[in-house]
Image (cartoon, rainbow, N blue to C red):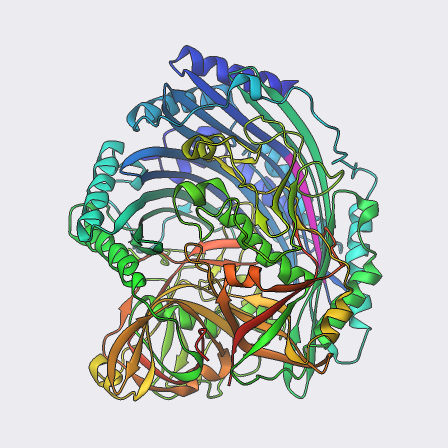
Amino acid sequence: MELENLATEVLEHARKHGATAGDVLVATGESFSTGVRLKEVEKVQQSQEKRMGVRLFVDQRSAITSTADFTRETLFSLIEETIALAKATAADEFSGLPAADMLAKVFPNLDLYDSVSNLSPEEKVALAREAEAVALSADPRITNSEGAEFSSGDHEVLYANSLGFLGKYRTSSYSLTVVPVASHNGAMQRDYWYSSHRKFDKLESPTAIGEKAAERTLRRLGARRVKTQEAPIVFDPQMAASLLRHLAAAISGSALYRKTSFLLGRLGEKIAAGGIWVDDDAHIPSALGSKPFDGEGLPTRRTPVVEDGVLTSYLLDTYSARKLGMQSTGSASRSFSDAPSAGTTNFFLKPGTTPPEEIIRSVRSGLYVTELSGFGVNPVTGDYSRGVTGLWIENGELTYPVEEITIAGNLLDMFKQIEVVGNDLDLRSTVAAPTLKIARMTVAGE
Amino acid sequence: MSQHSSTPEQIFLTSRDLTAQHLQATLSTALEKRADYADLYFEARTNEVVALEEGTVKKTSRSLSQGVGVRVVADDKTGYAHSDDITVDTLQIAARTARTIAHETGSPQIASVQGIRHPQRDLYSLPTAPTAIPLAEKITLLQRIDEEARRYDPRIVNVMASIAVEQKHVLILSSSGEMVADTQPLLRLQVSCIAADGNNRQQGSHGGGGRMDHHLLFDTDRWQTFAREAARQAILGLEAAPAPAGTMTVVLGSGWPGILLHEAIGHGLEGDFNRKKVSAFSDLLGKKVASELCTVVDDGTLPNRRGSLNVDDEGTPTGRTILIEKGILKGYLQDKLNARLMKMPPTGNGRRESFAHIPMPRMTNTFMLAGESTPEEIIASVPRGLYAVSFGGGQVDITSGKFVFSASEAYLIEDGKVTRPVKGATLIGNGPDVLTRISLVGNDLQLDEGVGTCGKEGQSVPVGVGLPTIRIDGLTVGGTQA
């Protein structure tokens, strides 16, 4: 109750000092992480965290402040400062809280919390140690390690606004990562594997993570370059998810009203191949992106955004919706020191029916992408150029590893050229996709 | 709490009734088990952002953060705990948590806590803290930037500009008893323009800043340069042709293209990766890794630069470290832990994002010294290639050595002349050999304008880069025109 009272008190103090509306975001929690390298504990880190973000309006003017100091003296002076800052900025006719009747009244139970209390620091260290040990013993060519890390967190989020909304939820998180290093003929490679979940029991086993990390690292040994050419490209699920992140950024409210999206004005148009279906779903039980209400207190939901290749919805918060003359999709995400902006919850491309092996078998000569690097994506034009690590496909088989090459194209063309969608969707992160095959892109190499 | 004019000792100690005895007791608790050293890192910072969009300033934000991190180091193990409350009790709790890394019993050697030392030099003493710049002044400047950018060309349809300032106070106490305090201002002005011609839309960005007096940005023509550059880049994009694909000669312009050094060699020369022998540069000290035209340094002591610090985040004075001298690998960037384990001197490169983070070796300002060619000679020497002058971000895999950095403004070179602009493209290469292919180094060394932020293991810190014009004989350009 203490944080509820504090949030209410902040809004009340703000009202008394001239704010016409406002909202408060409070998060508290603790996190723990431990790193093991070459079987020895290398790091133990523990933190207690708390932070409050306050957004205040004076009519259509607003300002945002945040602090970790919850003493009344600091908060009250911060509120007065925020009001003064708001008064100095220009009025924005689209600003403000959502309409009161739109606010969430019932909160779905999404099962986002799993108590960490019965897991001791020693047990957490043991998990990291085991995952690394499995990777190290997988093959004599695994000669070194950047270590394994186990981390856990327990956080509570509370949001309140001056329309009387007050909601909170508690989440837990667990993750285990291993980064082995392999060497052969004087060349080194590293890769990683991880598992991350809100439920401890749902983490992949240390053995599975260690084995997969070793396998991913070993298959990179002996990588070479290929000639510059056009070729079909198969993205593994992690890299296919990165394409989905570019899609999410391009349909988020701020990119649209700022006209910085290559998908501007394409609502209702075909932006991807037939058979492509993309959802943003905030209600998947225990999923990493699920939340019972959005960053402005609006109900969250499942929003289909691409249906059979057609863009059917943007992701909007209240401000961007008003700017665009549309309705919020309950997609507001709120950080402490910035206004709400639209973002994803669980954003994924629905699986097809083709097993990934069959997708690879369909390629006579092409590239299987397992890692992408760099920032060569232009959100305004969709122009795409990134560094690649992967495996070369010859006659339907993965053959030798490749590196120091790039792939380039344009995101809109790439989405339209998706030829096959794999059946291997795994919601291991908040943005996910199955294996995807794109008909042709330019590969730059030798 | 006003932190514009307060000193670190007032903020962290006097105002909280914390005394030398309390600090001593915290260190004693931290070092109760056998450990090599411990330190306390107190930090208080204020960040403010004022942003303009669609011709008006509708967004302001201010954020206050403060806290203390307690670290205990035993051999190569680190225990760390932090708290955003700074009291005698939280210090004790953090110290007890951090020391769990050490198991063996030992007899602690606690030096007595000395008085606060201020760094011997001050690279960024300012008449006004950046957080004390009046809001009205910032709003006026942003509006003038908007007008300047739109005046450049009627096809500029939107301008986004922001001023971000930071005032950070730190107090670092190490178990040797030394206590050092520093106040670190930071200022950054960023302009982004959208140009539109029919359905063709392009974005251009420019900006700069540093640990500098804001009058040098606000009251000179530098802000106009930023506004016009962002507009020029956006307009240029409207006529850019598809970029070439394949391996070719690449000429990098001076200044910000120095991001090449940051990615290709800088990260690979950080002490932690080399101690663990997971860097593509491990065991190459004394070996030739670049053409003899190349001398590369990391220098944290340049006055008013974004990447500079009086002392690093472990209290070690920053310095000028020669990484590569005439092509030979000479040194690594070190923090205390890695320097000790590698039996090398610390170089003042122990940095951390905040009190909530463990320090590690990081770059400051990394650049190549000037050579003798003129930029004109360098371009004229290339029959066919790419001339890249502005970049977005970059990334490196320090183990395989493969790095990328993405050009945002580039031109074709044909018969020794810069001809058509081409679209942005990622350039990819191999860190340990890219510098061996440098065949010409210009006499026009420039440091970047002061916008760089480097990320490593989830921690972001401000950095600088610099480069003279250089010619690289063979780098892969990731365009679409095969």
In depth, the one of A412 and B392 nearer the eye is A412
Q: Residue at x 29, y 75 (%)?
A: B468
Q: Is residue A357 above or below residue B220?
A: below
Q: Is residue A29 above or below residue B337?
A: above
- The residue drawn where x is 76% and y is 72% is A215
Q: Is residue B79 above or below residue A138?
A: above
Q: Where does the image place residue A394, in percent across and percent down from the top left?
A: 69, 83
Quarter of the image with the N terminus of chain A is top right
Q: Position of residue B82 (x, y in %)?
A: 59, 42
Q: Residue furthest top?
A: A16
In the displayed structure, would residue A140 be above or below residue A171? below
Residue A435 located left or right of residue B322:
right
Q: Is residue A35 shown in magenta? A: yes
Closer to us: A202 or A292: A292
Q: Which residues are magenta?
A: A29-36
In the picture, measured across the screen, residue A391 lies left or right of residue A199, that is: left
Residue B452: x, y in percent? 39, 58
Residue B344 seen: no
Q: Main secondary structure of the magenta part?
A: strand
Name the spot of residue A339 as percent of width and height, x first: 46, 34
